[in-house]
Every structure is written in structure tokens, then in C-alpha cells.
Image (cartoon, rainbow, N blue to C red):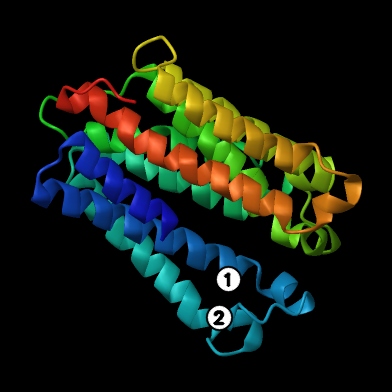
Amino acid sequence: MAVTGLAALLAAAFGLDVVSAATAVAAVAAGQLSIGWCNDRLDLRRDRAAGRQDKPLATGVVRPSTVGTAAGAALLLCIPLSLACGVLAGAVHLGCVAAAWTYNLWLKRTVLSWLPYALAFGLLPAFLTLTLPGRPWPPLWLTLAAALLGTGAHFANVLPDLEDDITGGVRGLPQRMGRRGSVTAAAVLALASCVVLTVGPTGRVPLAGAGVIAVTSALCLVAVAGPPGLARGRGPFIAVMAMAGVDAALLVVAGAGPFTGGAGP
């Protein structure tokens, strides 16, 4: 829901017409459903072993075959929806989805677990801008900021289930770095994304941008500089999520500039 909502906001910010925006957002939604359902199906044994009550598969509310079929159907639907946005745009989005499926099937358990997040988030703005007339690519700073935000989201996303993942044999980069290391990585990457989004549009730091960086830096300190025991609480996770929210808003505002004539924040 978060990624699909971000895609919708970016589509509006970039100035896509209603039909193009609806098609692109539908493609993102189908891709995200396929990724999420695939992930839950593959994690069924681990989720049951961990006693996950928030997972319908783990509690037996939904049958594994149903989820597997739904994941496959969503993936098949994603293909024509993506290509309806243009061959190049569709290929970019299908590459993002393929990266996420690769994460589910393999890279999730390796030191390269961050790579699919960087690729998929980094290329999301390109999928939407390539849907515009003239098929423009987004500026490099926008791609970099989105990739930093996505990589930071990877480290933040694992925090609530970090110990269960380790027990279940998932040894991605965050699990290898531990809770404190993952909190630090998530916060620093979110701060870096904020700086790129603030400086990128004009090459300088405007007054409003300096305030945003200051707020994000304070949240970064809350997440990183607390005592060791704090890392196990919800404080760092909430701080990192707040930073990600700020970055997502900046991504929409800053990204609108190159395609609507604005200058960004």
C-alpha cells in the first residue's frame, strides 16, 4: 500500500494524465501484490514457527495454494499493465518487480539483500517519467535519492522481526549487522536521501531545505545515539519511519520540479 500510494503521488507530481497515471498505478499495485503474496507463501514455515498471528497463512485462515495462485495471477496481470505504459517504461517496471521476486527467492538470505530494494526504488521514478510524452528519464539525483530511501527502508523493514528472521535462518545484510547496525544504516541512509533531495534540484540548500535537514538529522540522532537498550524498543523504528515519511514527501515535491516547471523545495 505504501509503495503504490507513493507511485500515485509521484504520477500526479510528474503530471501524468488520468489514464496514464491510473494504468501505471495499477501496474505498481499488481506488482506489489505479487511480491507480497510470494513473500508470505515462501515464508510460511518460518512464520508458523515464529507464531505470527498477523499472517493469514501462518494462522491457517488462507490456504497456501490460494496465495500461490493469487501471486501468480497478480504477476501475470502486472505484465500487460506495465507494457501499456510503453515498452521502455514497462521493461523498467518489470525489472523492478523481477528484482523484488529475486529478493524473495534468493537474495533475502545473502549479503546482497539490499540490492533489490536499491534497484526497485531507484527505478520507480523512471517508470513513471518514461510514461510521459517524450519518455524522459528522471535526473540522476532523483534516482539516487529514491535508491537511498529504498535501501534504508530495507533495514527499517526488518527491525520488528529481526530476531525471528535470524532464528529462522534468514541471513540478509541487516541480520548480519544486528539491530544496532541496522538502525544506524536505516537512519543514515534516510538522512542521505533527504540531503540529496534537498540539494539536487538547485545544487544548493534553500532555507526551507535546511530546516528539513535539521529535523531529519535530529530524528537520526534519536535513532542512532540512544543507549544500547533503546535499540530494542520502538523508539528507533518510529524515528526511522518518520524520516522515511519526510523523504517520501520530499521525493514527491522535489521530483515535480523537472517535469512541471517548478524548482523543487
Query: What's the residue type where badge 1 is placed?
Result: Arg
Query: What's the residue type where badge 2 is placed?
Result: Pro
- Pick the residue in front: 220 or 33: 220
Residue pointed to by mark 1: 41
Quarter of image, res 146: top left
Left or right side of 17 for 226? right
Identity of the residue furthest to the right in this view: 228
Query: For numbered disc 1, what is the local secondary structure?
Result: helix
Q: Is residue 258 visible?
A: yes
Instruction: State if disc 2 and disc 1 touch (CB < 8 Å).
Output: yes
Mark 1 or mark 2, earlier in chain: 1
Query: For numbered disc 2, what is the local secondary structure?
Result: helix
Residue pointed to by mark 2: 64
Residue 142, labelled with which disc?
A: none
Q: Image point 41% across, 25% down: which residue? A: 208
Q: Image point 25% across, 25% down: which residue? A: 257
- Pick the residue in front: 94 or 131: 131
- Residue 205 in percent (x, y) is at 44, 15
